[in-house]
Image (spheres, rainbow, N blue to C red):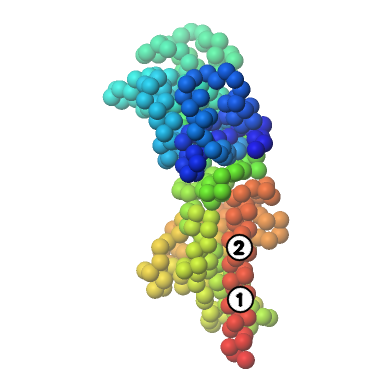
Amino acid sequence: MIFPDQPGVYLFKDKSGRIIYVGKAKSLRDRVSSYFQKPLNSPKTVELVNVYRKIDYIVTPTELEALLLERKLIDKYQPRFNIVWKDDKQYPYLKLTTNEEWPRLILTRKKEKDGALYFGPYESKSVRDTIRLIKRLFPIRWCKESPLKSRQQPCLQYHLKRCWAPCIGGINREEYLNFCNAIIQVLEGDLSAAIKLLQDEMEIAAGQKRFEQAGKLRDRIRNLSRMLQKKPGWVPRAKEKEGDTSVWELKNALNLKRKPRRIEAFDVSNISGEDVVASMVTFTDGEPLKSDYRKFRIQGIEGQNDVASINQAVYRRYAGSLSKKMQKPDLVMVDGGITQVRAAEKALKDARLKLPVIGLAKKNEQIFRPDRNVPIALPQDSPALKLLMRIRDEAHRFAITFQRASRRLVK
C-alpha cells in the first residue's frame, strides 16, 4: 500500500481485523515506512511488526487534528499495543494550570488532584508536538514562574509574537482565560466550539474599539478555520471509518454542537403543481435507515409551491404523531436554497423544536443555513459534501418513486 505524504492517523490491525495500535504522523508515508527500516528501535516495535496483518490510515487536514484524532481512537478502541506502552508509566500528560491566575500549558508525567486540567496520556513526541501547535494558535505564556510576576519589559517570546505578555498587561485576565477555554475545546477535539469562543471575543473587542486585539483574534480564527477547510476533508482508507469521518467533518464544517449522526432529509415532487408529494429519508452514521423513511401527500396547497410543501412536510413530521414515534434527528436537511431552509426552520419553530437545519442547492452544491445569507461551499471531493449529496439524491429518488406510484393509483 502506498501512503500519502500528508498528516494523519495510521491503524495497525491483526489477522482478525482488530485494531492493535494507533499512531499519528506528520507524514504518513515517512512514519509508516520507518517501521520497516532496520534496526527497529525496541522489542515492542519488533513484536508489533511481527503480529500485524494490515495497516489502514485516515488523512487529516493538519498535524494537530491528527494528534486529536489519535487520542480519540485510542480512547475508543483501547488497542493493546498502545495500552502496553502506556503501562510503562512513561507516557506524559498535558497540563493546563487552571489552578493558577495565568494558566500555562505544560508537560507532566504525574496526574495530581491540584485543580489543574489534564489531557492524555500521550506519547512523548505527540505531547511535545501538541504543545508546539497549540501555542502557535494561542500564544499563552511560556515562563515557568508561579505566580506570574509583573515586569517592566516583556521577554523574547513577546517580541517573537509567541506570547500575549500578561506580565506587562498585554492582555486582561478575562480575555486570557477565554483563550484558555478555547484551548480546552481544541484539546477535546471540538474546533468549532473553539472558533465560536474566539468569534465572541473578537466581536466584544471590536465593539469596544480595541481593534488591535480584534485583529489578533481574527488571525487566530482564520488559522483554526483553515484547519477545518484547508484540505478536501479527511480521506479514510479504513472502510468502517468512512461514515464516522464524513459525519465528523460535517460537524466541523457546519459548526454544530454535536455530530450529526442521524440526518433526516426532505424533498418534494409534483407534476405541473399536481399530485404533490414529499419524502423524508433518514441516514444514521452515513448509512440509510430505510425503516425510518416516510412519505407525505401534500394537502391544501394549490399549484407548484415547493416552499409551502416543504414547510408542511417538515411540520407534519415534527408536530404530528411521528414526533412521538420516531427519534429526533441531529440535523434536518431540505433540497433547496435559503427560501426552502427558512420554510423548514419556521415549521420547526411552529412545532416548538429547535434543531439545526440546512439546505443543499443543486446549483454549485452549496449549503444554506437559515442564519446566513452567504452559502457554505465545501470542496467538491469533501467526504462531508459527498454524504450530503448522497442523502439529497436519495430523498429525491424516494420522492419521485412515490410520486409516480401515486399517479398510477389515480389512473
Label drawn at residue 401: 1
Q: Position of residue 268 (x, y in %)?
A: 60, 72
Give x and y (percent) for residue 402.
58, 77
For image coordinates 53% across by 58% down, the residue present is 287
Q: Name the residue at 31% across, 25% down.
A: 115
The C terminus, quarter of image: bottom right
Per the image, label 2 sits on a secondary structure element best described as helix
User: Which residue is at the front of the view, 335 or 398?
Assistant: 398
* Left or right of 267 in this view: 166: left
Q: Looking at the picture, which amino acid does disc 1 mark?
A: Thr
Local packing at callout 2 (Cα closer than 10 Å; few below 14, some 14-19, many 20+) is many
Q: Give the residue pinned by disc 2.
A: 392
Using residue 110 as the reference point, say whether residue 267 is left or right of it. right
Q: Name the quarter where the N terminus is drawn.
A: top right
Tag 2: residue type?
A: Arg
389 sits to left or right of 74:
right
| Residue 354 picture quarter | bottom left
